[in-house]
Image (spheres, rainbow, N blue to C red):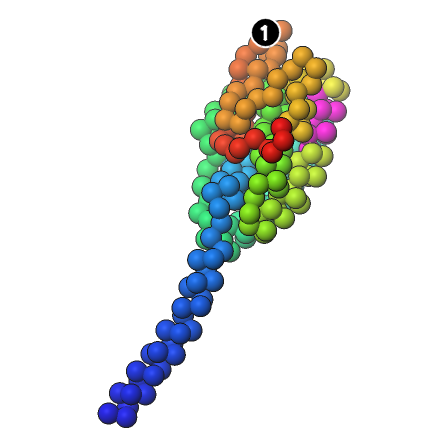
């Protein structure tokens, strides 16, 4: 009988220990905003790593090759933090780019020479605009501190990428979409909505719509915009 009582007491102590742990785990469940941002930025990273490889393999310009290598390295490092944060918060990450992103990768795989460089730079510009907008939204509207800090760390890197892409586009004579990375339309331009397409001049002067790599980043517009 004494042994049974001791077992009952031990079981009670174990349950008392489990209850606070379970409550603590439930308390750190990220919001929908935080969850969607982690998933979306992971898909951006998956795209950028693959696109960076393609730039190094198929780029005609040395500038495209070099920037592709830089973007691959930076997004690989960023994704390590994304995966670690998602694991800590119990957020399941997608295993592949979005359908829009894969469409762009298919186009890049089928392109070559100057056409490849033009498509790569244009799609990268559009994708980084959307990634920056989504990151700004997370900073202003996210509730989980670890995810907000991740976004704060990522923003300068994404902005530096965008600036480098603009510089490279100017060097190669590739038109830059009339949208600033801050999400504010430039004179005469419009801001692409997350999940939409971005019109970019194609070789020969005609316009074609290319899905932006950030196609599934569906986040509310930053407060005050």
User: Circle 1 — which element?
Assistant: loop
Image quarter where the C terminus lies is top right
Q: Where is residue 40 in the image (x, y as percent from the top left)?
A: 51, 38
Is 91 drawn above or below residue 105 in the view shown?
A: below
Q: Quadrant of residue 176?
A: top right
- Nearer to us in this view, 96 or 56: 96
Start and end of the magenta stretch? 161-169
Q: Position of residue 213 (x, y in %)?
A: 54, 28
Q: Report which residue position mark 1 lands on.
A: 206
- Nearer to us in this view, 160 or 133: 133
Residue 129 inside the magenta-drawn segment:
no
Residue 162 inside the magenta-drawn segment:
yes
Image quarter where the N terminus lies is bottom left
Mark 1: few/some/many CA within 10 Å (<14, 14-19, 20+)? few
In this view, which residue lies farthest toward the front? 224
Q: Position of residue 53 (x, y in %)?
A: 59, 34
Can residue 69 be spotted in the picture? no
Can residue 16 be spotted in the picture? yes
Is 222 drawn above or below residue 152 in the view shown?
A: above
- Would you say 224 lies left or right of 171 here? left
Q: Quadrant of residue 74?
A: top right
- Would you say 201 lies left or right of 209 here? right
Residue name at image x 70 percent, y 15 percent: 187
Residue name at image x 60 percent, y 21 percent: 191
Residue name at image x 55 percent, y 36 percent: 44
- Would you say 87 lies left or right of 74 here? left
- Nearer to us in this view, 7 or 125: 7
Residue name at image x 44 percent, y 68 percent: 20
Is 34 drawn above or below residue 14 in the view shown?
A: above
- Nearer to us in this view, 17 or 225: 225
């Amino acid at each position: 009988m004494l042994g049974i009582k001791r077992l009952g007491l031990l079981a009670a102590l174990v349950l008392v220990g489990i209850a606070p742990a379970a409550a603590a785990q439930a308390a750190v469940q990220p919001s929908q905003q935080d969850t969607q941002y982690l998933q979306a930025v992971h898909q951006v990273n998956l795209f950028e790593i693959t696109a960076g490889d393609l730039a190094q393999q198929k780029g005609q310009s040395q500038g495209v090759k070099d920037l592709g290598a830089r973007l691959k390295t930076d997004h690989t490092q960023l994704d390590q933090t994304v995966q670690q944060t998602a694991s800590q918060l119990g957020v399941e990450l997608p295993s592949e780019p979005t359908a829009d992103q894969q469409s762009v990768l298919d186009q890049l795989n089928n392109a070559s020479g100057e056409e490849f460089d033009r498509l790569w730079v244009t799609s990268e510009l559009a994708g980084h605009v959307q990634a920056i907008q989504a990151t700004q939204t997370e900073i202003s509207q996210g509730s989980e501190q670890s995810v907000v800090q991740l976004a704060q760390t990522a923003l300068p890197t994404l902005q530096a990428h965008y600036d480098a892409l603009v510089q490279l586009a100017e060097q190669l004579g590739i038109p830059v979409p009339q949208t600033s990375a801050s999400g504010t339309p430039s004179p005469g331009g419009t801001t692409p909505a997350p999940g939409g397409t971005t019109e970019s001049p194609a070789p020969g002067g005609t316009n074609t719509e290319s899905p932006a790599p950030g196609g599934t980043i569906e986040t509310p517009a930053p407060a005050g915009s």
